[in-house]
Amino acid sequence: MTKLRSLRLLLGLLTFLLMGVQLSAAQDRPNIVWILSEDNSVHYLRLYGAELGVMPTVERLASEGLTFEHAFSCAPVCSVARTTLMTGCYAPRIGFQNHRRLKPAELPDGAELFPAYLRRAGYHTTNNSKEDYNVVKGTEWDDSSRKATWRSRPTPETPFFHMRTTTVSHEGSLHFKAELMQSEQPTANLASVELPPYFPDTPTFRYTLARYFDRMRSVDEQVAQLVQELKDDQVLDNTIVFYFGDHGGVLPRSKGYLYETGLHVPLVVWMPEKWKSKSPFKAGTRPEGFVEFVDFGPTVLNLAGVTVPESMDGRPFLGSGVQADDVNQRDEAFGYADRFDEKIDFSRSLRKGKYKYIRNYQPFYSDALQNNYRYIMLAYTEWRELYHAGKLNDVQKSFFEFHPAEMLFDVELDPHEIHNLAGDPQHRETLLDLRKRLRERVESLPDLSFYPESELVDHVLPHAAEFGQQHREEIQRLSAIAQLELVPFAKAKSHIEAALMSDNRWERYWAATVCASFGEVARSLTEQVRPLLKDSEPIVRVRAAEFFGTLGLPVAKSTLLDVLATTDSPAVALLTLNSVVALRDGPQHVGFAPTELKVKARGGEVDRRLQYLGLNVDTEKRKSK
């Protein structure tokens, strides 16, 4: 018994000593706080040159910390951007690139949302409160709720990671009634508002922008309150504070689009004196290097002394081992835009230095393609009304016309991205370089959007990442077919014909997509495309119908209506309705009466499309009971 008692005493002493080591280690690790403001890019902050975007607290943090000149969300919408932040992974590789998932993705085996790694390292992790993830959740949070706070940590010495989202700048803050413009005046004088050249100069647009600048003041007040809470709790001197926008926005042509207004976000990092050694940059400076949302999670892990898992695509830009020269030499940012609510597109962007390249894989759609939530904003609806009334200049009306398959902008000389240099011989070398770089990006991921979302939802998710790796070669073939959109039709024709006759349904799908992209130029291929109207794959039929729709041929309408009436898949129905809206609202003006829409697969985003098309969904549901 004496030996046993001695062994117990020895084990107790070892446990006590280990606890002391852990406590000491905890005290030697920084707390980290993220403050996110929804839907705002650098274009709305005085810190980045917008004089009406007054944010004194953020500006003070910046003067004492770091202002990153080139921080980018990888996606211009909440759920995709936030999931990118939390995973450190590019969305098209994992399968969470579509906003408001129809079905969640799973991370590859062994991968987790980054706060889970912090928890295992002894951090207390809390989120207040927006999540909006497109992947299956794990054990990343000790508390994620509207009441979540670092104050719930088990001991005062426990290091914490806290994430706080301020919602006052969300898109919904601009969903006001017209009467408000008379009863409530913004702080800024409307005459002092500078409108981008792609907006019509109207009182509505001036008021909307001025009101949004007031949202920046409200955001700053909430930042000030949170910083004061940290100070009151006597933890600010041990806390690294990040402030950034969760993606761009939110006026028309920003949120949901791959322009700089949709992706280029403010990022300020404040470090207390104790932890300034964690930064390779001097306080008060403005690092020039490009940092992306995939880098944010790895950066937090690195600051906390946690090994960054190989499953993440990002690289730390602060913390141990990071060199200022290395960060400042980074000059590329990758962006992706797919489905936003019921509006479907497929675009990718690559900014390298001052040049921005955007690849639109479905150029037969316009930026203005209907999204019900977007058009609640008065500025959106007025813009469209002015377009139909013929009251817009060429720059202002381009939003409502087909976007080119590829666009190239010099964002230093052309910050509003209105002068497409893709066809300029003087920029041919730059175009080819960025075209090649982006293609290498999407193929190396590999990018799962070369399959329509219906295929991912109905047959691939939640294990999309593994599927992508298994089908890497097929994705490369599909990418090669898609690139035919960029080749003169005469050179592309024989390759398109071969793909139209392929045994592979997705090769046929992309061949039909290329035909729709060429439109009238590809009329000579109508007989080769016609068999696809009866294809065994419904989405191939839809894409073939879109090609015939661009030619004004009635078979497009009957094919789309037949798919809607027969498919059991809500994802297929949603993709089909996207085509219906594009053909109805576009220059083809294909008529679809509500009584013609017999849709078998219903619910969710499908019903939103049907409501826009004039179908009273609630009445239909009552009749069916």
Image (spheres, rainbow, N blue to C red):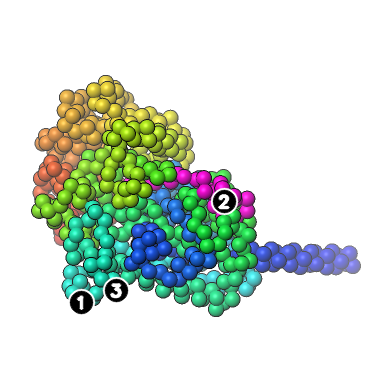
Crowding at dot 2, Cα within 10 Å, few <14 / some 14-19 / many 20+, comes out as some
Q: Estimate the spatial distance between the alpha carbons at disc 3 and disc 2, rounded to whole Å.
A: 39 Å
The region drawn magenta spans 313-341
Crowding at dot 1, Cα within 10 Å, few <14 / some 14-19 / many 20+, comes out as few
Q: Nearer the viewer, mark 3 or mark 1?
A: 3
Q: Is residue 546 visible?
A: yes
Say how many tags the image has.
Answer: 3
| Residue lying at 52% horizontally and 62% vertically, measured from the top left | 284
What amino acid does circle 3 point to?
A: Thr
Q: Is residue 212 above or below residue 320?
A: below
Q: Nearer the viewer, residue 145 or 352?
A: 352
Q: Estimate the spatial distance between the alpha carbons at disc 2 and disc 1, rounded to whole Å.
A: 50 Å
- Image quadrant in which the N terminus is located: bottom right
Q: Is residue 77 above or below residue 541?
A: below
Contact (Cβ within 8 Å) of mark 2 with mark 1 = no
- Name the quadrant containing residue 304: bottom right
Which residue in the structure is indicated by mark 2? 324
Which residue in the structure is indicated by mark 3? 187
Q: Position of residue 133 (x, y in %)?
A: 42, 56
What amino acid does circle 1 point to?
A: Ser
Q: Is residue 373 visible?
A: no
| Residue lying at 30% horizontally and 51% vertically, measured from the top left | 416
Q: Position of residue 257 (x, y in %)?
A: 31, 50
Q: Main secondary structure of the magenta part?
A: loop
Q: Nearer the viewer, residue 170 or 3?
A: 170
Q: Nearer the viewer, mark 2 or mark 1?
A: 2
User: Viewed as shown, does residue 100 lie left or right of 365?
Assistant: right
- Image quadrant in which the C terminus is located: bottom left
Label number found at residue 183: 1
Q: Estimate the spatial distance between the alpha carbons at disc 3 and disc 1, rounded to whole Å.
A: 13 Å
Does the magenta portion include 333?
Answer: yes
